[in-house]
Image (tube, rainbow, N blue to C red):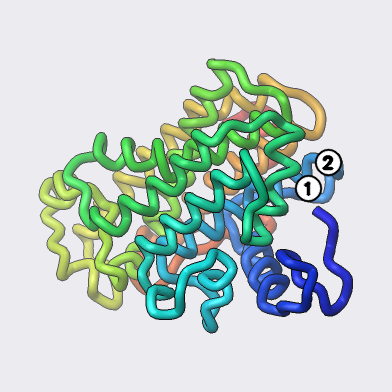
Amino acid sequence: MRRPRPGQSAVTGTGTPHAGDAERGTLGKAAAENFPVAPFFVPRAWRTDLMAVYGFARLVDDIGDGDLAPGGADARLLGVPPEAAEDRTVLLDAFEADLHRVFDSTPRHPLLRRLQPTVRRRSLTPEPFLGLIAANRQDQLVARYETYDDLLAYCELSANPVGRLVLAVTGTATPERIRRSDAVCTALQIVEHLQDVAEDLGRDRIYLPAADMKRFHVQEADLAAKTAGASVRALVAYEAERAQNLLNEGTPLVGSVHGRLKLLLAGFVAGGRAAIHAIAAAEYDVLPGPPKPGKLQMLREAGVTLRGEG
């Protein structure tokens, strides 16, 4: 997407500073993710398209979580009146309407304008984008998951579309690669849920399956403690092992491609493995805050993944 000249809006070109601020604020979150979004070593055209996809995914999550930048710039860009700017369902409806404009007219939001050339260049379909919106709608209605299968169904909407979009952008999608990618993306989502147990509880959401909590004798009140007791730690370790198994199932995806894409996909897997390592290093006590891996651990896991040792 063309950068606006100073004083221009990325949406209208007429001088609305909030548009550029909203775009930069969302894209700037890429560095904090567990996995590399669009690293320097991938071709420039891929970086452009991967960042466009990331911008969509990050913004829809921010809408669903109520994490939009203060001031209501995103709501105004989507045409949502000020009195409804705090209504996440209204915002998601407006965002979906703007998504459809990506495919048939001109979208309002700068991040969707950024996405439009990518959609056309890569012949992307609406389905994965709609899945991400549906996941965030579900977050407004569902705050607890009874079983692990229920959680997997949520990840099918909230995580798997991202991997499918990466394969579509790079022109490498096949049924087998999609299956492996789904396993990796679901694992990354589960790991993120484990890191964010306390934060999610603050939003009145629990992504630990209720059946597993019961099995490990964990009550919701236990998740509100400052540090995790033995039962919570055992539950987190159990879910982390499930995520590790999913990563192992998906890792052959890395060996199925070549060149820079192999490095990129290895980075995704390594990000998940390093995060699991950080959780284990914290002795599965995720309640004080998200255990985060260091860069050295990320590099070590990337090397292991590329050598096919994990």
- Tell me, yes or no, if residue 124 can be seen here: yes
Residue 146 in the figure: left or right of residue 309? left
Above or below 168: residue 97: below
Above or below 25: residue 150: above
**Secondary element at tag 1:** helix
Residue occupying the point 52% across, 42% down: 129
Give the numbered dot on residue 22: none
Residue occupying the point 67% across, 66% down: 23
Q: Toward which corner of the image does residue 156 lie, by quadrant?
A: top left
> What residue type is disc 2 on?
Ala
**Secondary element at tag 2:** helix
Task: Specify few, some or many for label 2: CA neighbours under 10 Å numbering under 14, 14-19, or 20 or more.
Answer: few
Give the numbered dot on residue 48: 1
x then y, percent, for residue 272: 53, 46
- Tell me, yes or no, if residue 31 can be seen here: no
Q: CA distance from mark 2 to mark 1?
A: 5 Å
Q: Which residue is mark 2?
A: 45
